[in-house]
Image: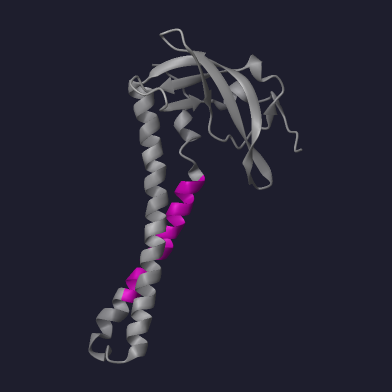
Amino acid sequence: MHNNTNSPLRNHGNPAFWIIGLVFTLIGAPFLGVGLFIWQTQAGNMHRDDHLALSITFCVIGVIFLCVGLGFLLGHFAKRKHIRTLMREGACYDAEVVNAYFSNVRVNYQPGVILECKYVDTQGATRLVKSGSLWRVGLLRRPEDYRVRVWVDHYNPKKYFVEVLDDAITGSVDYDDR
């Protein structure tokens, strides 16, 4: 296994999803708490429709926010666990970047960049893989000059992770906004 100080986990598992999940969870919990508080304190007055409707409204909004937030958080942590498992148990190959192109998704008016990479596995077969969207880079001037690591599951080569370290591509990008 390769040891490096620049952890690839820092750049993957999309921290935006973690932040969104945390915000939604932190919004949902007070809504649910207020709804349950109204339900408990007004239990004797629940024959009035306004207290019942208010309590149910707060509880439903809280549950919706909590479910969305926890979904984002669970997805984030599941992806990080998958990456850790591949890096611990999978095969590591050095791959050549053969193409770089803009993704269809833009964040702050900047498109993500996807790298197409090829590597030769232990059976001698050449495989083509794609990285996830990279957000802090533009298109590489000469993609074929760059190498990345690909971590592949031993039993299912469709499960892979392309490790792109920041220092592998910094200073070598062309910010063509098209």
Q: Which residue is farthest left?
A: 44
72 in relation to 36, above or below: above
Image point (42%, 18%), residue name: 3
Instruction: State which quadrant residue 29 falls in.
Output: bottom left
- Tell whether 153 sits left or right of 173: left
Image point (49%, 25%), residue name: 163
Quarter of the image where the C terminus is located:
top right
Q: Nearer the viewer, residue 148 or 166?
A: 148
Image point (47%, 24%), residue name: 5
Image point (37%, 88%), residue name: 50
Q: Position of residue 39 (x, y in %)?
A: 28, 80
User: Number of callouts in the render?
Assistant: 0
- Tell whether 171 sits left or right of 131: right
Instruction: State which quadrant residue 70 falls in.
Output: bottom left
Q: Which residue is farthest top?
A: 124
The colouring scheme, among rainbow, by chain, secondary structure or one colour, is: one colour
Residue interval drawn in magenta: 16-35
Q: Position of residue 66 (x, y in %)?
A: 37, 60
Q: Nearer the viewer, residue 174 or 116?
A: 116
Quarter of the image where the N terminus is located:
top left
Instruction: State which quadrant residue 86 falls in.
Output: top left
- Indicate yes or no whether the magenta region holds residue 11: no
2 in relation to 45, above or below: above
Instruction: Tell me the chief SS of the magenta region.
Output: helix
Can residue 162 be seen at all in this image of the molecule?
yes
Can residue 30 be seen at all in this image of the molecule?
no
Q: Position of residue 122 (x, y in %)?
A: 41, 9
